[in-house]
Image (cartoon, rainbow, N blue to C red):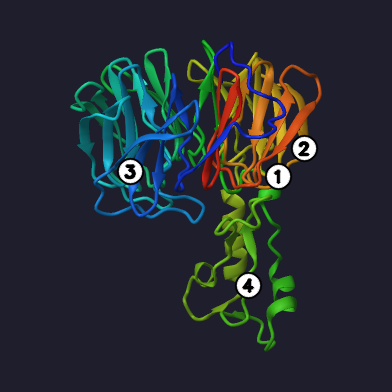
Amino acid sequence: MADDDAAPPVKFGIAKWKTPLPVGHSSPVVWGERIFLTTFDKKLELVCLSAKNGSILWRHAAPATSFEETHAVSNPATASPAVDKERVYAYFSSYGLMTFSHDGEALWNAPLAMPKTHHGSGASPVLAGDLLIINHDAMSGGYLLAVDRRTGKEVWKQMYPASGRVESYSTPMVWHEQLILHRAGVIEGYRVADGTRAWSMAENTSGASTPVASDDVVYVSSWNNLGEGDQRPALPDFAVLLKKYDKNGDGAISAAEFPDDLKFTARPGLETIPNSQNYVAFRTVDRNKNGVIDEAEWEAFRNRVGTMATDHGLLAIRAGQVIWRENNSIPEVPSPLLYRGRLFLVRNGGVATCLDASTGKIIYRARIGATGAYFSSPVAAAGRVYFASSEGVVTVIAADSVALKVLARNEIGEEMIATPALVGGAIYLRSAGNLFAFGN
């Protein structure tokens, strides 16, 4: 959310400037007349640009010797920098921490062991007083780390409990004297002072989005593969399976007969995104490894999938208790936006939901007219909410209306994953290959 005096444009028009950049999903972070972000092109870099004209003022490479494996959609430059009046802090899961002055002078580095993950890191560093906080999560051995922002020296390190769940991707939220984390399978609070765990709440969630909060309520958008109805494809019973695929009529399904396009979970709106859908694998059903699937094995698989199907949802948590939840149209990656007493969500396909933050009552749910996948989180300024689609459309809506009111759809024409920055009269948009400035 932007400062109160921010007034970015509604209709963007011609870009004030455009600067080509290597790939990266970190969001632009603006401090005064400088913009900081990270990039990847055979090397990882922290880049500083002029907010006035987009010129590159300086760039520094991280001395990484190898790079983490990431999802097909992602890359190793996902973490947005943290900035204070003296320093800019960059985190690369493939290397660790780098810190510079605003003028590009190297101050300190803190190398960290690269974690083993399924899809790469997603968390950004955050500042909490004199501490710099990192969610250094992993498939095993993940931890929450606090270092002294002035020196990079470790202040405390809290190992995450071994849970059998995969890594999380969200950024810690600083709230009062706690760090709120949305991790795989759990929502929890840690004390800023020493990293001890204050509370924990089990939840079937992948831990991708970052929480938001009011003075007394924490809001977390939990999500899982089978979290709502349109993510749960109907698996046929065995009789239907035989009728369709049993080519030799032996009453069983061999590996050669088994289809390769049978989904057991779905991500609506992401059909064109690589590795976004989950298909039934023959080997997971053939439990006795005899090379064919019989009725007992197939029905056992269907039952297992059925027991895995638990609702996800947007949770409102006060004093460790869920006071309301909304289970439908929950985004996988974008974080919720809390603005003027309302919560805004955007799901793949361009489905926006607006809720009353105090009660959870849905004010409206509607399609905003810009389809495709959504990875960018909504942002707001001047009574307006901005949604950026991966297909390069930024939709601007009125924040206070009782029904969806679209003010503009701005076609950038380039893929967008990073969340925009709203500062003063400008909006800064990062695409797959450029950083744009629109407005004044």
Q: Secondary structure at mark 3?
A: loop
Q: CA distance from mark 4 to mark 2?
A: 42 Å
Q: Residues within 10 Å of mark 2 (few under 14, many from 20)?
A: some
Label placed on residue 93:
3
Residue 86: quadrant of the picture: top left
Q: Which mark is residue 102?
A: none
Q: Which residue is mark 4?
A: 295
Identity, as a three-letter code, of the amino acid under mark 1: Gly
Q: Picture coordinates of residue 326 (x, y %)?
A: 66, 29
Q: What element does badge 2 sit on?
A: strand
What is the x, y in percent for residue 78?
A: 43, 42
Q: Amino acid at mark 2?
A: Arg
- Of the numbered discs 1 and 3, the one sitting upstream in the chain is 3
Residue at the far bottom in the pictured view: 248
Q: Nearer the viewer, mark 4 or mark 1?
A: 1
Left or right: residue 229 compared with residue 30: right
Mark 1 sits on what residue? 349
Q: Secondary structure at mark 4?
A: helix
Quarter of the image that includes the N terminus: top right
Percent x, y for residue 200?
A: 42, 27
Task: Say whether marks 4 and 1 touch (CB < 8 Å).
Answer: no
Q: Earlier in the sequence, mark 3 or mark 2?
A: 3
| Residue 355 drawn above or below residue 414 | above
Looking at marks 2 and 1 on the same chain, the residue that comes earlier in the sequence is marked by 1
Task: Report the amino acid beneath label 4.
Answer: Glu
SS state under label 1: loop
What residue appears at the point 48 percent right and 34 percent down from the top-left corner? 27
Q: Nearer the viewer, mark 3 or mark 4?
A: 3
